[in-house]
Image (tube, rainbow, N blue to C red):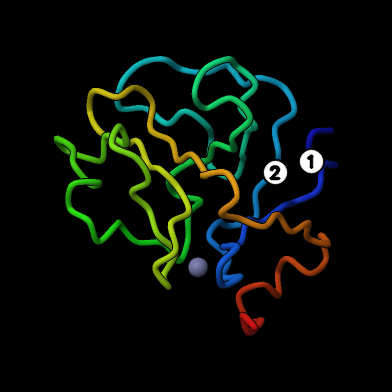
Amino acid sequence: MGDKRPLILFKCAGCWLPVTRPVRLLDEVPDLPSGDGVDLLPEGYCWRNDLTGKSCGRFLLNLRDMVNTRYHDDGRLVSGCCGLSGIDGVNTLCANGHEVATESSDCWTGPYHVELEPYTYIITELDQELVPALNTTPLL
Ligand SMILES: [Zn+2]
């Protein structure tokens, strides 16, 4: 039933490079884990945070659904113990250097996830039948 929802893909607003794999939007609050070192969301899904707090209204994703991204050039923003803490701000760029997301993947910052920054992305809805061709389609 849940698979009737459209697949969506996030692209960088600066260069239109896809920065995520096709994912499905969860419309209910998933059973969010709260421990450290586990994935907040399963692969292949994104969720629009509707809990109060600084992430309210932002899209959250699994780390492994991010594509064409790299860490920030500014070393101060990619601090962390064994991963990225994400507490210092945007630490993930698209391959062309636009700021797109904040990754939290350190051992003490709770479940791993990526939070897309507001106004840095374009949401594209995918036609299901086109999905298998995605990898062979030129980007522009
Ligand atoms: Zn970009």
Q: Residue at image x 65%, y 48%?
A: 23
Callout 1 touching callout 2 (CB < 8 Å): yes
Image quadrant of residue 30?
top right
How far from the left and from the top, in percent, is residue 67? 47, 61
Q: Nearer the observer, disc 1 or disc 2?
A: 2
In the structure shown, which secondary structural element does the residue marked by tag 2 occupy? strand
Question: What amino acid does circle 2 point to?
Answer: Arg
How far from the left and from the top, in percent, is residue 34? 41, 15
Q: Which residue is mark 1?
A: 3
131 relative to 3, above or below? below
Q: Residue at image x 60%, y 16%?
A: 51
Crowd band around label 2 with a 10 angstrom C-alpha radius: few (<14), some (14–19), many (20+): many
Picture quarter with the C terminus: bottom right
Which label's residue is closer to the chain start, 1 or 2? 1
How far from the left and from the top, in percent, is residue 98? 44, 63
Q: Residue at image x 34%, y 22%?
A: 110
Question: What amino acid does circle 1 point to?
Answer: Asp
Crowd band around label 1 with a 10 angstrom C-alpha radius: few (<14), some (14–19), many (20+): few
